């Protein structure tokens, strides 16, 4: 059994396969000899990476796979066969199929030093190494996450002893042992000279990277948030709007630096709990990022909006220390431990700090930790917490700090080129550099809602663009910001989940020897979102931009949607919904409200031509940037003018299903009507790092009659003559949100009876090959929007409302 992520495999029996061909070709060859590759999703028969990627990014096109052999003897036997193949010996009787597989491998080896110290870790360490060999460098040493406590403790002692023997020192340790999440790690200080020697020769005798119990040698996890450093705006005379009600519950937790709770735009809306004792280390004038996040969550853009968020206040638990260079995590602690302890205080114990919270805003990125296939320990922690406590983490996709290189053109020629030519060059440059611009940890977390940024303001710019800055889009175009990190996510899941406004990103041209670089301007008060600022006193304001800002606005939209669910005339009017239900409902509503804009559809058509008609890969290319689409906050709170939105909650178990009956509007029967439908499921899947398929539970919805579960009895037209929209049916099955877009297959609506319903079956399968317990209850939310393209004399919203919002018929 081969897998793409090494977490959970047994170190003494771990085998590493380095392929020499694209993964699709290797998977098919492995299957021919009965060796299954677990990559969480199926590789389609015609799936291949485009040729232009193979040369540019061979290490990603030809991935490394991992396996745990049944016994050490089996491992040794396979290594012997591989060495025989390398010596060009003929295959022994019965071994010919293995020889065919070996021809596709660049290397086959036991887990070793080069796996513990990965290429990504080496590159980041090299970036951080000081010139002085005696200066200290901090490393994180992750022990194999086995559930065997005795083994972990022994491996930890051996690692500590080796660090001391090499002249290093122990700074911090963490041991988290939960069902579904195990983390054993050390933070150590080593001389730059010893780290340089390890990078040059990871397999050196008596070195760190040869320890059997050590899984990874990593640069210290440095969490950071980098705010705009521009001078503050002059605060408006009426800076204070409607005040916050101190009796409102705290429904969101902000993990960031320290906000200024007494700022006039925030006063009464923010409570700070200094769990880690970090607040005294953050000077007030430096508390920029957390203050701007709190501002956007609580009031939105202060000039375009400014009204307090509905029915909520904010709890801030600082996990970063603010300084004049931004905010970063404590130097003497393991950040996974810092986050875990903050969440324990917020949600567990006899007196949790945030008993009413269902959202955690995490607008923090990890320096140098762009997603390259392995799910980070921090993302695994968030996945575990989401499922265990029923919390939705809203995580920014991350901002790419690197310039984008445009080859073979001068700055003058680029500036004089038509806008479409500029955009084409930018798209090609992004494609060539995509694996340097991937999601920033922990935004690959499967149970999180990952947010990217659209290059867009909510008010007009204050002045014309200065000389040297060029537009990359037409005014009003909805396109991802140049600096917004791109997907896909773990196991090719759709990430980012969605996009929203992240502020206008100004771009400057920087000439180079062979072309030019595009650089996002870090300081500007001409454009951006209007936020509360730590500079300029208690009424200071500034302009801000980036995926953090987009993330905060999505958090605000979810809080407002949660209030709408239980207010007068809401579907759950007067009810106190549990934390998990609010988290799932608002997650489902957020994704259900997202739409691919026209720019995404145009991008798809261009990609389909470039990829010679391979429509699935063209859709994936668009999804890397747009995910499910652009968030429409108003659609989260109310039904569309020409339609209706239904929501529901349910619980399923492995191989089980429940059916919702959606009343069909009588006025539509037999009418000629253009129509669209969006159906979205959201759940938190249990996770198990020790399994090749990390996500355990997969849900989907089908339209079917009666209690039938076979594909033959699925209603392919959803009773309204519908067909799939822009996202492929296989693409939406990969994560923990399932969202199907449907459009009319023909203009005429089928005839149906006065009391007819659309039966929607939500069913659950084990996505892990045996890891999901039949006793596990999987809670989910469903959101369904039916919308008409033109006005009619009938109100389908009221027709459905009169019959039933969403009725649960029964469980199988």
Image (tube, rainbow, N blue to C red):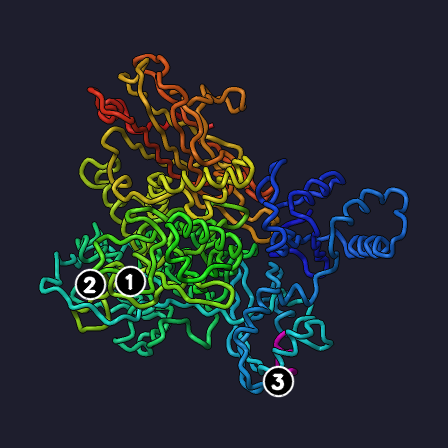
Residue 433 is tagged as: none
Q: Is residue 331 above or below residue 762?
A: below
Crowding at mark 2 (Cα within 10 Å: few <14, some 14-19, many 20+)? many
Q: Which sits earlier in the primary sequence, circle 2 or circle 1? A: 2
| Residue 506 quadrant | bottom left
Mark 2 and 3 residues: CB-CB less than 8 Å, in contact? Answer: no
Residue 266 is tagged as: 2
What residue lies at 32% left-to-right and 34% top-to-bottom? 647
| Residue 183 quadrant | bottom right
Q: Calculate the distance from the C-alpha at mark 2 to the C-alpha at mark 1.
A: 17 Å
Q: Which sits earlier in the primary sequence, circle 2 or circle 3? A: 3
What residue lies at 34% left-to-right and 50% top-to-bottom? 473
Q: How many marks?
A: 3
**Image location (x, y in percent) of residue 262:** 19, 69
**Image location (x, y in percent) of residue 525:** 25, 65
Position of 182 with respect to 719 (left or right) is: right
Position of 11 with respect to 321 (left or right) is: right
Q: Where are the magenta residues, as a range?
A: 158-168
Residue 760 is a magenta residue: no
């Amino acid at each position: 059994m081969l897998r793409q992520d090494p977490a959970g495999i047994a170190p003494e029996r771990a085998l590493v396969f380095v392929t020499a061909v694209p993964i699709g070709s290797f998977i098919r060859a492995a299957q021919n000899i009965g060796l299954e590759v677990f990559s969480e999703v199926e590789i389609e028969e015609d799936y291949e990476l485009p040729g232009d990627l193979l040369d540019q990014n061979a290490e990603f096109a030809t991935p490394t796979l991992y396996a745990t052999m049944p016994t050490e003897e089996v491992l040794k036997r396979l290594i012997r066969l591989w060495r025989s193949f390398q010596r060009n010996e003929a295959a022994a009787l019965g071994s010919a199929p293995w020889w065919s597989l070996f021809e596709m491998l660049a290397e086959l080896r036991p887990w070793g030093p080069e796996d513990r110290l990965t290429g990504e870790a080496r590159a980041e360490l090299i970036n951080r190494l000081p010139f002085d060999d005696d200066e200290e460098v901090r490393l994180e040493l992750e022990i194999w996450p086995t559930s065997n406590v005795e083994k972990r403790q022994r491996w930890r002692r051996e690692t500590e002893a080796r660090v001391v023997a090499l002249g290093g020192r122990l700074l911090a340790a963490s041991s988290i042992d939960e069902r579904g999440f195990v983390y054993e790690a050390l933070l150590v200080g080593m001389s730059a000279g010893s780290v340089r020697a390890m990078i040059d020769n990871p397999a050196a005798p008596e070195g760190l990277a040869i320890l059997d119990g050590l899984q990874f040698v990593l640069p210290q996890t440095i969490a950071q948030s980098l705010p705009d450093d521009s001078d503050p705006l002059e605060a408006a005379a009426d800076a204070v709007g409607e005040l916050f009600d101190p009796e409102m519950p705290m429904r969101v937790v902000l993990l960031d630096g320290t906000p200024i709770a007494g700022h006039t735009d925030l006063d009464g809306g923010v409570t700070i709990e200094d769990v880690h004792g970090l607040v005294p280390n953050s000077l007030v004038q430096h508390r920029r990022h957390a203050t701007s996040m709190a501002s956007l969550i609580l009031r939105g853009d202060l000039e375009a909006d400014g009204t307090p968020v509905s029915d909520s206040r904010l709890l801030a638990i600082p996990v970063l220390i603010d300084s004049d260079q931004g905010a970063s995590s404590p130097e003497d602690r393991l950040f996974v431990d810092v986050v875990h302890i903050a969440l324990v205080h917020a949600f567990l114990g006899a007196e949790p700090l945030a008993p009413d919270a269902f959202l955690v805003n995490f607008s923090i990125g990890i320096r140098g930790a762009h997603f390259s296939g392995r799910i980070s320990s921090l993302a695994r922690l968030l996945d575990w917490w989401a499922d265990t406590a029923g919390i939705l983490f809203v995580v920014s996709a991350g901002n790419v700090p690197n310039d984008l290189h445009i080859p073979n053109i001068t700055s003058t020629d680029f500036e004089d080129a038509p806008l479409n030519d500029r955009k084409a060059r930018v798209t090609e440059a992004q494609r060539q550099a995509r694996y340097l611009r991937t999601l920033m940890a922990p935004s690959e977390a499967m149970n999180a809602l990952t947010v990217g940024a659209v290059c867009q303001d909510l008010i007009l710019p204050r002045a014309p663009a200065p000389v040297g800055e060029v537009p990359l889009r037409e005014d009003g175009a909805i396109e991802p910001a140049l600096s917004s990190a791109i997907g896909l996510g773990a196991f090719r899941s759709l990430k980012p989940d969605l996009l929203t406004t992240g502020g206008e990103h100004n771009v400057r041209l920087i000439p180079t020897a062979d072309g030019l670089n595009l650089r996002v301007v870090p300081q500007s008060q001409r454009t951006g979102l209007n936020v509360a600022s730590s500079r300029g006193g208690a009424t200071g304001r500034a302009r801000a931009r980036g995926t953090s800002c987009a993330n905060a606005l999505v958090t605000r939209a979810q809080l407002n949607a949660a209030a709408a669910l239980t207010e007068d005339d809401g579907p759950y009017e007067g009810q106190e919904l549990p934390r998990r239900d609010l988290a799932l409902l608002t997650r489902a509503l957020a994704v259900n409200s997202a739409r691919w804009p026209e720019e995404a559809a145009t991008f798809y058509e261009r990609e389909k031509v470039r990829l010679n008609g391979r429509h699935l890969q063209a859709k994936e290319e668009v999804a890397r940037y747009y995910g499910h689409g652009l968030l429409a906050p108003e659609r989260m709170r109310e039904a569309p003018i020409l339609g209706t939105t239904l929501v529901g909650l349910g619980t399923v178990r492995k191989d089980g299903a429940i059916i919702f009956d959606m009343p069909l509007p009588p006025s539509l029967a037999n009418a000629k009507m253009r129509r669209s439908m969006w159906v979205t499921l959201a759940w938190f899947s249990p996770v198990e790092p020790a399994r090749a398929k990390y996500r355990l539970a997969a849900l989907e919805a089908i339209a079917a009659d009666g209690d039938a579960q076979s594909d033959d009895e699925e209603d392919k037209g959803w009773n309204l003559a519908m067909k799939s929209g822009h996202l492929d049916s296989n693409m939406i099955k990969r994560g923990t949100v399932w969202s199907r877009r449907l459009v009319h297959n023909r203009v005429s609506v089928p005839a149906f009876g006065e009391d007819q319903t659309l039966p929607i079956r939500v069913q659950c399968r084990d996505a892990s090959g045996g890891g999901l317990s039949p006793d596990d209850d999987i809670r989910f939310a469903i959101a369904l929007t039916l919308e008409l393209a033109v006005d009619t004399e009938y109100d389908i919203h009221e027709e459905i409302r009169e019959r039933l919002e969403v009725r649960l018929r029964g469980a199988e």
